[in-house]
Image: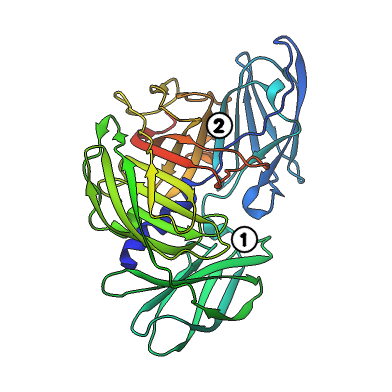
Amino acid sequence: MIRDLTLWLGTLALLTASTGCPTADDDDGGGARIDLEGVVIDRNLGDAPVADAWILLDTGDELITARSDGDGSFLIPEVPAGTPVTLTVAGEERRATTYLDRVLADEELPLELGCEYREASYYDLPMIVVSGTFTGAPQGSYVIFSGEGVLNYDYFYVESATTEFQFEAQVATDADEYFFTALAFDGGTGEALAAAAVTVDVAAEVDVDVELDHHDTTWMTISASQPLLDGEPLTTLDPTYTSSLGMVYSGDGPGGFTGWTMDWEATASGFDLDVTYVPIDDEDAHITLYLAEDLTAGGAFSYAILPFEPGATELDVQMMDSPLLDGGGDFVPGTTVTWDPVEGATDYTIYVLDGDSLAWWFLADGPSFSFPRMPDGFDSSIILDGTASWVARAYERTEDDEGGTDLDQPYRVAETPDGDIFFE
């Protein structure tokens, strides 16, 4: 059961990455020109400014380069306001982003461009140590602790009514509070038995007593539609990582587990997943579904996050088809990648993986992506040094007030990997 959790934990951050570009209601004529003011920020560091980032602007008639100042700001004077342009931001050891066919008159200025490090090791994220005792878990069960630092979790065997615990968690640099859950489960069957949710102040060391006093274990049947993955209907699910196919968590965002999938079966219209979970009073409940034949193979998959009422015993989920790539292949200068629109999708992206590192985002208004031109003399190794692989993504999301993803609304993602990407 614990092995089954590992894959889901390692992919969640990528799946829920926000890729929006701020927009406004302003409009302007196609012949007008504006001064493009903006700032390059690192959203993983509380929007800290990024100095010396490259900003590459292709107006169609000319290629313009600029560098961000020490405060992250930049200025490109006299650029077309109403004509679509291509805008790329990049930096040393940072993930690049290319915005295709953007009309600057529709953007909110000054323009904010995110430029985060590729590797998490660049971030000195605070580590907190949470320790104390927990009660209420049946003797002989296991208790898993997990929370907002989703990649950090630990579990403990229950030998007595009161059990000591200690685990470490990384938290966001600007976090004041840390939310986590404790879930007791049967070590033989994996069935959820009891749970608790706790919020503590962020500090180097935290002591807390956790009472697992919610014993209303619930079984829920999730009926998921059958998605097409790269044009082929999905007929079977990964039997090795069954628990990762559907996981329940509490709180405002992906974080503390309160249940997971125990079994599944194929139906005439898709799949039924049997999920065991513990509802927690006054806490939101969400289900994540990750449907694929092999969760470790890196192939096409369909993914969804949906809120539901705690205590629900049935849930119908419409899964999204992944992009159907006709031919695909290498994505290099001078080429364009397209696919047919995906039903239900609100956004499309291509992202580039350099090994396990997320190296480059391409954002467009529709499922058509052209490799951007680069100015003469520009060191393209800042963006990509060698060959990497590209993945096509369709997704449905609702923006929150800050332009991020509102996980109180359904969020669906479907992806299809394809060929290589490189500069010739």
Q: Position of residue 323 (x, y in %)?
A: 36, 30
Q: Position of residue 230 (x, y in %)?
A: 30, 32
Q: What colouring method underlies this structural image?
A: rainbow
Residue neighbourhood size for the residue with mark 2, other residues' Cα within 10 Å, grouped as few (<14), some (14–19), many (≥20) = many
Disc on res. 172: 1
Q: Quadrant of residue 253?
A: bottom right
- Check the picture and name the quadrant holding the C terminus: top left
**In-image side of 112 versus 186 (left or right):** right
- N-term-proximal mark, 1 vs 2: 2
Identify whether 264 is placed above or below 304. Answer: below
- Check the picture and name the quadrant holding the N terminus: bottom left
Name the kind of residue labelled 1 in the image: Ala
**In-image side of 122 versus 154 (left or right):** right
SS type, badge 2 = strand
Which is more toward the observer, 32 or 117? Answer: 32
Identify whether 208 is placed above or below 311. Answer: below
Q: Position of residue 192 (x, y in %)?
A: 37, 69
SS type, badge 1 = loop
Disc on res. 98: 2
Q: Residue at x 51, y 69 (%)?
A: 181
